[in-house]
Amino acid sequence: MSLVRELDDGVAIVRIVETEAYLPGDAAAHSFRGETARNRSLFLHRGHAYVYFIYGNHYCFNVSAERAGIGGGVLVRAGEPVAGIALMRARRNDARDRDLLRGPGRFAQALAIDRSLDGIDLCKAGPLWLGAATRPIGDVGESRRIGITKEADRLLRFFERGNPFVSGPARWA
DNA sequence: AAGAAGATTCGCT
DNA sequence: GCGAATCTTCTTA
């Protein structure tokens, strides 16, 4: 699957290579304690953006994954640049290509994703939308989710095995 | 009203 | 490898 970002200065396209699932009833999910002003987008019908701000510095991008009224989504943790690399580089302080989109905070920064995109429909054309895969995904690995303390043992992180744009220690790739 | 925790990143040792 | 940075949100430790 690819993600397309339409910016003032051009279009950036990214191939999604790493995600984590946050399911209904999952204590680690932001939706676990019910709907609030911050997480309401997680309760939208699948295919809408949920963007939140974390650690005082970073935005993280998620796609809602359940039916309307049920909270759940997928965190996009990493991507492989496909087009518009110069645009991403400019927003990432000229980081090297491998670091442009590796990790949820970097991913959002490279694509200029912030709370103004929270709640938008990703299944239709607009500033940000999901497109068909530019290349089929390869072998999918799974692991524990990164950076959480609750429900830490569940294997809900998915990534393309061997892909250098995946975050985390090399052994996970 | 105050405080702690948080789906992270970067720079320094 | 470790710790600081930095601020919003939810909980009441």
Image (cartoon, coloured by chain):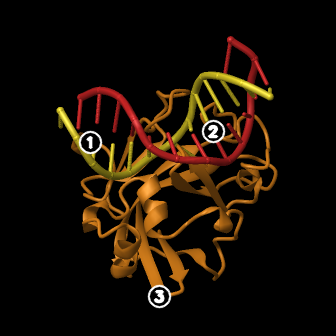
Chain colours: A orange, B yellow, C red
In the image, which disc is placed on residue A2? Answer: none
Kind of residue at disc 3:
Gly
The residue carrying pointer 1 sits among few (fewer than 14), some (14 to 19) or many (20 or more) residues within 10 Å by Cα, namely few
Badge 2: residue crowd in 10 Å (few <14, some 14–19, many ≥20): many
The front one of C13 and A84 is C13
Q: CA distance from mark 1 to mark 2?
A: 23 Å
Let me know if residue A29 appears in the view: yes
Q: How many marks?
A: 3
Q: Indicate left or right for A69 with A155 as reference.
A: right
Residue found 73% across the figure and 49% down from its top: A38
* Residues tagged by mark 2 and mark 3 found on one chain of the structure: yes
**Which residue type carries mark 1?**
Pro
Q: Nearer the viewer, mark 3 or mark 1?
A: 3
Residue corresponding to mark 2: A29
User: Which numbered dot is residue A169?
Assistant: 1
Identified at 34% across, 78% down, the residue is A85
Task: Decide which of tag 3 and tag 1 comes sooner along the chain.
Answer: 3
- Identify which residue, A126 or A142, lies in the foreground: A126
Marks 1/2 in contact by CB < 8 Å: the verdict is no
Q: Tell me residue A55's x, y (percent).
A: 52, 43
Question: Residue at the spot x=51%, y=53% of the render?
Answer: A58
> Could one spot residue A77 in this view of the protein?
no
Q: CA distance from mark 2 to mark 3?
A: 34 Å
Residue A10, labelled with which disc?
3
Residue farthest toward the bottom in the current orientation of the protein:
A9
Q: Amino acid at mark 2?
A: Ala
Q: Residues within 10 Å of mark 3 (few under 14, many from 20)?
A: few
Q: Are marks 1 and 2 on the same chain?
A: yes
In the displayed structure, does residue A100 sit left or right of residue A153? Answer: left
Which chain letter goes with mark 2?
A
